[in-house]
Amino acid sequence: QVQLVESGGGLVQPGGSLRLSCAASGSIVSMNLMAWYRQAPGKQRDWVANIFSGGSTTYADSVKGRFTVSKDNAKNTVYLQMKSLKPEDTGVYYCYAFSLGNGYWGQGTQVTVSS
């Protein structure tokens, strides 16, 4: 069983930046994939970014060029650096891990972009 704990959310003005963290209870080296998703109020959960075991990354078009996903294997932590934030980036951000056929979710962290 893998536990994921997100942190770093908060209230930020449009154009601002935030860095989210996702700390795993075990080694992330063996994870095939780690990802970030977000869910706006009243909407479905949407994929934001992936980082694969080899370090390659992919992004949703809506965040490409503004968000960067990275990981620190030594700290068992995945990050989401968010810049040029927009009100439409508001939502609960969830960390996801996939390994050996099993998927795991964190509890989420709230990001609110508002003036």
Image (tube, rainbow, N blue to C red):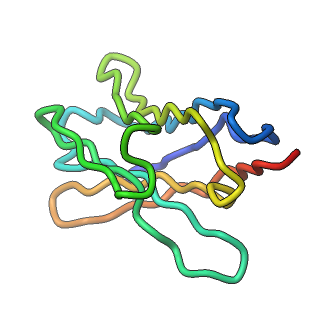
Q: Residue 66: percent from the left, percent from the top?
A: 46, 38
Classify residue 51 as left or right of residue 76.
Answer: left
Number of on-image labels: 0
Instruction: Return the residue nearer the eye: 103 or 41.
Output: 41
Quarter of the image for residue 72 reads top left
Look at 59% across and 68% down and name the residue there: 39
Look at 37% across and 36% down and name the residue there: 69
Which residue appears farthest toward the left when viewing the image? 54
Instruction: Return the residue nearer the eye: 74 or 48.
Output: 48
Which residue appears farthest toward the top when viewing the image? 74
In the figure, 84 relative to 72: above or below?
below
Quadrant of the snapshot with the N terminus: bottom left
Q: Residue 95: percent from the left, percent from the top?
A: 47, 51
Instruction: Return the residue nearer the eye: 19 or 12.
Output: 12
Which residue appears farthest toward the right when viewing the image? 115
Classify residue 47 as left or right of residue 22.
Answer: left
Classify residue 11 as left or right of residue 17.
Answer: right
Look at 62% across and 55% down and name the residue there: 89
Look at 47% across and 49% down and name the residue there: 3
Q: Residue 46: percent from the left, percent from the top?
A: 46, 69
In the figure, 40 relative to 5: above or below?
below
Quadrant of the snapshot with the C terminus: top right
